[in-house]
Amino acid sequence: MLTSNSSQLAVAASLQSLIKNYTSGANVAGAAEEITAIIQNEQASFLDRNSELTEWLEKNESYSELADMLFDLLMVQFLSAELHSEDYFDSPEWNDIENKTLDFGSEMLNLYLYLSEARETEVEITLEDFLNEFLLVGEDEFQDEYRIYESLIVNEEILDADLTEVREAKKTVKPETGLQEYFVSLVLFFQLVEGAIDLADVQKDLTPFESAILNALLAFQEN
């Protein structure tokens, strides 16, 4: 896992980029500061912070579309702020967290955790490594992951696709996988990291949501 200081830096950078690229206005900086304070409040429990984040979103409905990504960042912060033994993930505390947050978060949490691990192990970040070495989509016991990410697995040329083709591929993603709304940003992220495209070439054609997700991932990876 990342150290506490580097984790806070990466999470804060990702959060700032998420908010800044989603909307504009005088309240952007204040919103980012308020959310950062909630997520990085190590004196509060995970569930208390999640409740506070939920309350903040209820009061600031213009950011509701980002709710799952904000939860993902909260989880990344929690998991990387201190070392957890393998036994912790069988503990009553963790089971309570899992049971009370079943409806929170997105598939981008997997990508955040992959980026954290890749930084620690200094492996090259690629779509192939993410799918095969981190998610283990080729293993029989990980067929749920295969089902979710099948649209990426079967589209072998996706990293060479232009934005129009990526949007067409998005239509094949089953809504129940939870990946559809993040598909464009996810593909573009790996295209950028692997040097297939330049951000300037696609940024202007993205929706605010796509831009926010993509730039949040890039900020996390770069910090």
Image: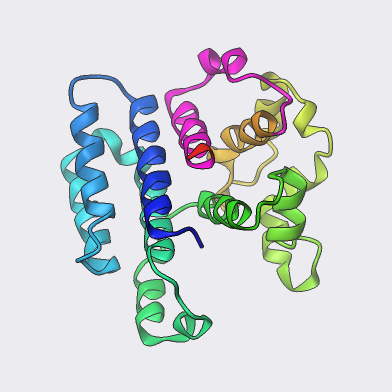
The reply, left or right, for residue 169 in relation to residue 15 is right
Which one is nearer the viewer's eye here, 116 or 99? 116
The residue depicted at 58 percent of the width and 46 percent of the height is: 179
Residue found at the very far left of the displayed protein: 59
Which one is nearer the viewer's eye here, 100 or 194? 194
**Picture quadrant of residue 59:** top left
The reply, left or right, for residue 12 in relation to residue 29 is right
Q: Position of residue 120 (x, y in %)?
A: 59, 57
Which one is nearer the viewer's eye here, 223 or 162? 223
The residue depicted at 82 percent of the width and 45 percent of the height is: 154
Whether 197 is among the magenta residues is yes
The residue depicted at 20 percent of the width and 66 percent of the height is: 44
Can you say whether 82 is above or below 105 in the image? Answer: below
Can you say whether 79 is above or below 162 in the image? Answer: below
Can you say whether 190 is above or below 130 in the image? Answer: above
Whether 211 is among the magenta residues is yes
Q: Is the magenta stretch mostly helix, strand or loop?
A: helix
Q: Position of residue 55 (x, y in %)?
A: 18, 52
Q: Position of residue 45 (x, y in %)?
A: 25, 69
Q: What stretch is highlighted in magenta?
A: 194-221
The reply, left or right, for residue 115 in relation to residue 122 is left
The residue depicted at 41 percent of the width and 72 percent of the height is: 98
**Picture quadrant of residue 84:** bottom left
